[in-house]
Image: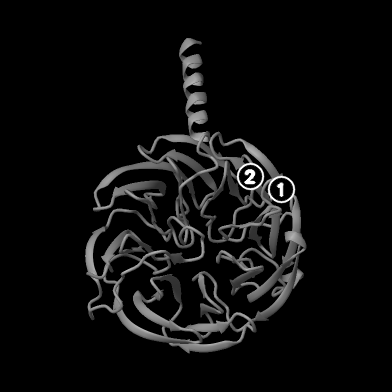
Amino acid sequence: MVPFFKTSILLTFTLCVYSCFSQTSNIYQWRGANRDGKYTESNLLKSWKPEGPELLWFSDSVGNGYGSPTITKDKVYINGEIDSIAYLFAFDLKGNLLWKTNCSKEWVKTFPGSRSAPTVADNLVYVCTGLGNMYCFDAINGKKMWSLDMFKDFHGQYIYHGHSESPLVDGNKVFMVPGGKDTSVVAIDRFSGKILWAYKGNGERPAYNSPYIIKLPQRSILVTFTAYTLLGIDANTGELLWTHAQDNVPVAERTLGNGDTHSNTVLYDNGFIYYSEGDGNCAVKLELLNDGKAIKQVWRNKAVDNYMGGFIKIDNYIYSCTNSRRNLVSMDASTGMVTDSLKCGIGTIIMADNMLYYYNQTGKVFLIKPDLSKMEIISSFKINKGTKEHFAHQVISDGKMYIRHGKSLLVYNIKSE
């Protein structure tokens, strides 16, 4: 009894210490600080040599996967699968492995490996596996703080290509989308792992989506997808505020893997929500009304069918790939009309220092100059290390570009001298 009593006091004390930082967290996450693919870097190279930027270091031991790395001020975190087990790896910024910790079994069916990016909030790191397990680890030493199984704990549903949600932290909460019959979306106390609220939903399975938070004076809104619905939920209470149906697939044809892949995180900007879901309604602009309690569709462009490459909004233009036409397009955000296109394949897109970085599924990386409605390819090079598909989103931090290709993590120097 005494050792257990001492352990309980220590755990309680530890959680109290962590909770003191709940409202002032330093968060490092999927697609940058605002989940919008924009990185606040400056003084970066405006062109590359034919062979590409200088390769500073690489690791061939991060395991199978497609999840992007997450970079903090002193560490690189990345998820990977080795021999069917999910691992979280921590490197220093020079590429030295500091530690790796095992989670549980990882997804090894379609496209085996990790599918999401870790989220770091202060000294805690949150990880989701393709089999629907969420873990909270100490970000310094990799010690497990708590874990949840969205299927056993929340009656969640498996999806065709494995759970792919990159955890979202807001204040003392971390969110999950189990897609259960009675727990569609849940908010969890990120320090203890205890459930704070559950939105019951209509029984739809998850949709591979990483959620987004809209901050309004009146409320915070959690925006995410389930299989055939975009949801707006009060992030503090779990109250459903509005929905937006994905009507591309008739109800009678809605089977697992048919029209239920909505991998791109939405964007909120100046009163409007933008999303691009090629397996759903494609490119869409919604107006947020009534203090966030309602929405109205402004336009829809079904030709811009981006499945999982992300998109970038700069001023009044949106840059997105299309899967059917296999190109990169610019769109007028007011009208939804395509204004320019580049034949550079299906890929993922981010932005830094007023330039676009595009990594396509053949392994080619492009540096592109956006000029309002037009785009110009400045430089390109080919990734020559790694395994399997080129699906991971690239990351930029401290003058370096991080690209994950399967078992390999490559780090390039893109800082201008």
Query: Residue at (53%, 61%) from the top-left corner?
Result: 161
Asked which secondary structure carries label 2, the reply is strand
Residue 360, can we see it? no
> Disc 1 vs disc 2: Cβ atoms closer than 8 Å?
yes
- Disc 2 crowd rating (10 Å Cα; few below 14, some 14-19, many 20+) is many
Q: Between 299 and 398, which is closer to the camera in this rendering?
A: 398
Give residue 215's position: percent from left, percent from top: 63, 56
Residue at the image position 29 percent from the left and 62 percent from the top: 410
Q: Where is residue 223 drawn, in percent x and y?
A: 64, 59
Left or right: 292, with 358 as reference point: right
Residue 387: image location, x then y, percent: 33, 65
Among the 4 quarters of the image, the one containing residue 405: bottom left
Which amino acid type is marked by label 1? Gly
Q: What colouring method underlies this structural image? A: one colour
The amino acid on which the numbered mark 2 sits, given as a three-letter code, is: Ala
**Which label sits on residue 187?**
2
Q: Is residue 216 left or right of residue 364?
A: right
**Horizontal placement of 321 versus 143: left or right?**
right
Q: Which residue is mark 1?
A: 238
In the image, residue 149 sits, relative to residue 220, either above or below, namely above
**Could you tell me which secondary element the residue under label 1 belongs to?**
loop
Q: Residue furthest top?
A: 2
Q: Image height check: is 261 above or below 165? A: below
Between 240 and 63, the one lying in front of the other is: 240
x then y, percent, for residue 201: 74, 53
Q: Earlier in the sequence, mark 1 or mark 2?
A: 2
Q: Nearer the viewer, residue 236 or 144?
A: 236
